[in-house]
Amino acid sequence: MTEIRTPRLLLRRWHDDDLAPMADINADPRVMRWVDGGPVHDLDRTAEDIERWEEEWDDEGFGLFAVELLASGELAGFTGLSVPEFLPEVLPAVAISWRLGSPFWGQGYASEAAQATLEFALQDRGLDRVISIDRVGNQASANVVRKLGMTLDRETTHPVSGHPLRIHSIDLTEYEA
């Protein structure tokens, strides 16, 4: 079982009891504002998402980690790696992403989890390059991308919603520098 510990977080595979708290996160319009055009996800959709994320772990050897606070055991959300099949123009690629519940915003958890995930991708999984895809205007995600040391590759639009997106990347040589 793949786990990563940071000073404040445990990044781990998904448990059955993660469904309800993740569904609560996905039901918050403030959280989902920047995701897939903004619709909230219900319990069934969240269950499908978690099942898909776990399948990606089995198929690819990486996926989205559940992010748990070490101090309380609370599920804060996720961070991890996925193949961004919704955006064929960037393929082949592996993207890093994150989604935390609003009570966990502004405390550095997303940056802490993303940094550990980036290290996992480039050093443990042997990836040569990782991208991030964020919506233009999402300043919180842009701040995490900046802290990861990623550079802007291009701007594009989401093929379904039409929202403007920014594609950033970092490769192993940039990460090690």
Image: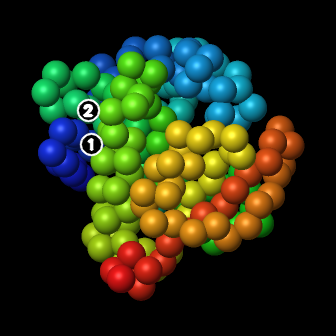
Q: Position of residue 61 (x, y in %)?
A: 38, 61
Foreground residue, 133 or 137? 137
* Residue 164 in sight from this viewpoint: yes
Foreground residue, 106 or 102? 106
Q: Position of residue 96 (x, y in %)?
A: 49, 55
The crowding category of the residue bearing disc 1, from other C-alpha atoms within 10 Å (few below 14, some 14 to 19, many at least 20), is some
Q: Would residue 157 appear left or right of 130 to someone viewing this image?
A: right
Q: Residue at x 59, y 20 (%)?
A: 30
Q: Residue at x 42, y 57 (%)?
A: 147
Q: Could you say whether the residue bearing mark 1 is in a helix, strand or loop? A: strand
Q: Residue at x 56, y 49 (%)?
A: 142
Residue picked out by circle 1? 12
Quarter of the image where one finds residue 151: bottom right
**Quarter of the image with the C terminus in it:** bottom left
Residue 38's disc is none
Indicate whether 65 appears above or below 29: below
The Cα atoms of the two marked residues, 2 and 1, are separated by: 8 Å
> Which residue type does callout 2 highlight?
Glu
Q: Could you say whether the residue bearing mark 2 is in a helix, strand or loop? A: strand
Q: Which colour style is shown?
A: rainbow
Q: Do tag 2 and tag 1 residues touch (Cβ < 8 Å)?
A: yes
Q: Position of residue 78 (x, y in %)?
A: 41, 37
Q: Residue at x 47, y 42 (%)?
A: 98
The nearer-to-camera label among 2 and 1 is: 2
* Residue 61 in sight from this viewpoint: no
> Which residue type does callout 1 highlight?
Arg
Q: Would residue 45 appear left or right of 22 to someone viewing this image?
A: right
Quarter of the image where one finds residue 127: bottom left
Indicate whether 47 appears above or below 167: above
Q: Would residue 71 appear left or right of 48 to someone viewing this image?
A: left
The crowding category of the residue bearing disc 2, from other C-alpha atoms within 10 Å (few below 14, some 14 to 19, many at least 20), is many
Residue picked out by circle 2? 68
